[in-house]
Amino acid sequence: MRARSAVAALLLLGAALPTTAAASPGSFPSGSNAAELVRNFWDFVAQGDDDRRAAHPKPQAIEQATDGGPAVDLSDLSQPTALEARLKPALTPRSGPIRLTVPGGTARLGDFSVGSTESVTGPLLVVQGDADIYGRLLGNLVTVDGDVIVHPGGLVTGDILALGGDVRDLGGEIGGEIRTLRSTTIFAQPAAAAEPPPNALETVFRRLAGVIGVFLTLAALGFGLVTFGRPNLEVVSDTVSHSFGRAFSTGLLGQILLLPTFGMLVVGLILSVAGILLLPFAVVVYGLLVVVGALGGFLAVAHAMGETYIRRRLALGAVLGSPNSYRYLTVGLGALASLWLAWAVFGWVPVAGDLIRGAAFLVTWLLATTGFGAALLSRAGIRENFAGRLIPPEALTDEYLWATPQFGVPAARRPGGTRTPTRGL
C-alpha cells in the first residue's frame, strides 16, 4: 500500500518538474521552488498513508473471550484455508465487539507495530491493520486484511501468514515460512438471500398480465392500422387467405435472406462516396421496414382469421351484426391469444406446460412467417395479384367463401336469409 503511494507521488513529482522548469526557461528551479516541491511531495506521501490508515479501525487490543468463547491456536500456519475458516466465526460476531483468545499470544485490532527496542513473545494476530516489525517477535505472525512489513533490524522467529494482504521484507530477518492469501472472505459482505421462487398462483397471474398486455398493445396497433391503412391491410389479409402456402414460403425465404440483404445493402453504400453519407439513414429505414412488414403481416393474419370465422358464422345464419375490420382483428387476436393464455394458466405443469408453450410458439411463428410473406408478395398491400381480387366479383360472396364451388357451378343458398354482408367498414 505504501509502495503504491510512493509510486504515485514519484509520478506526480516527475510531472511537476517539467512544469517548474518551464516557468523559467533555460534555468533550473530556484531553491525556494525546489524546497516547496519536495515539501509537497512528502505531504502527498503522508496524505496517502493517512488515507490508508483511515480505512483501518482505531488500534486497540482485542478482548479475550471468556466463558468458553472462541479461541484460535496460531501455533500451526501450514493450512491457511483451515485457519481462515476457524477465524471467520470468531472475527465476525453476530452482536457486540470482537472477543477472541489466542493461546499464549496477543490479538490486536487495527495497525500494530513492534518497536525497535521491544520484544514480543508468542504468536501475534493483527486484524484489519498492518503489522510493522522493527523489533523482535518470538513466534508466529498472522494478519487479516492487512500487510506485514519487516523493517531493517526486525526479526520474526516463526512463520508469517497474511490473509488478504502482502508480506514485505525490507531488510529484516524471518526465521520461518511466508504464506499469503491475497483475498479473504472473513469480512466479506454476506450474499443477499435468494428471493424464493414464486408459487404457481403468482406465476399464473404474472404470465396472464404479460400475455394480456402484449395482445392489448397489438390490438391498439391493429386498430390504428385499420383507421389509417385499411385498404392495404385488407389486401395483405386476402393474400394470406388465398395464397397461404406461397405466403409462408416467401416469408421463410425472406427470414433467411434478411441478414444477407442487409449486408449487401451496407457494402453497396460503403463502396460509393454518397452512399456512406446515406448509410445511417438506410440502416434505420431497413430496420423500420422489417419491423413494419413483420408486425403488419401478423396483424393481417389475425384479420384474415377473424374474417374467415365471422363470414362462416354469417353463412350459417348467425346474427353477428355488421362485420368490419375492427371485429375481424379482435376475433383473430383473441384466437391467437388463447394459445398463450392456455400456457399462462397451465404453464406451471411440468411436462404439459412445456408442450403448450412449444405449440403456442410454433403456431405463432408459422402465422407470423405467413404474414411476413404475404406483406412481401403484396408489396405491403399495393399489389393485388395474390389477393384473389382478380377473380370475378360474383365469386367473392359468402356462399363462395363457405361452399367454395368451382367457377360456373352455382353455389348453394345460404340458410337463414339472403343478405350478403358487405366487406370491411
Image (cartoon, rainbow, N blue to C red):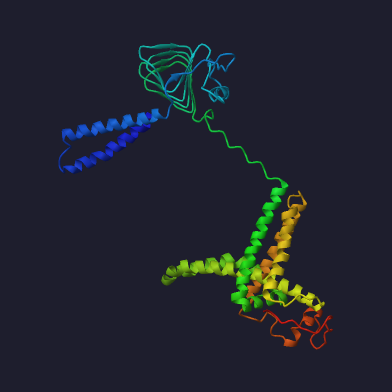
Q: Nearer the viewer, residue 207 or 286?
A: 207
Residue 355, percent across and down? 75, 55
Q: Nearer the viewer, residue 8 or 400?
A: 400
| Residue 229 visible in the picture | yes
**Residue found 71% across the figure and 52% down from its top:** 204
Q: Quadrant of the C terminus?
A: bottom right
Image position of 327 (left or right of 141):
right
Image position of 97 (left or right of 232):
left
Residue 21, percent across and down? 20, 41
* Quadrant housing residue 14: top left
Q: In which quarter of the image is the N terminus?
A: top left
* Quadrant housing residue 42: top left
State how many labels appear. Answer: 0
| Residue 294 visible in the picture | no
**Residue found 80% across the figure and 80% down from its top:** 404
**Residue found 67% across the figure and 52% down from its top:** 206
Residue 215, percent across and down? 66, 63
Residue 106, percent across and down? 48, 15
Q: Nearer the viewer, residue 63 or 241?
A: 63
Is the residue 165 above or below the residue 412 in the image?
above
* Quadrant housing residue 375: bottom right
Is the residue 5 above or below the residue 86 in the image?
below
Q: Which of 271 and 147 is in front in this view?
A: 147
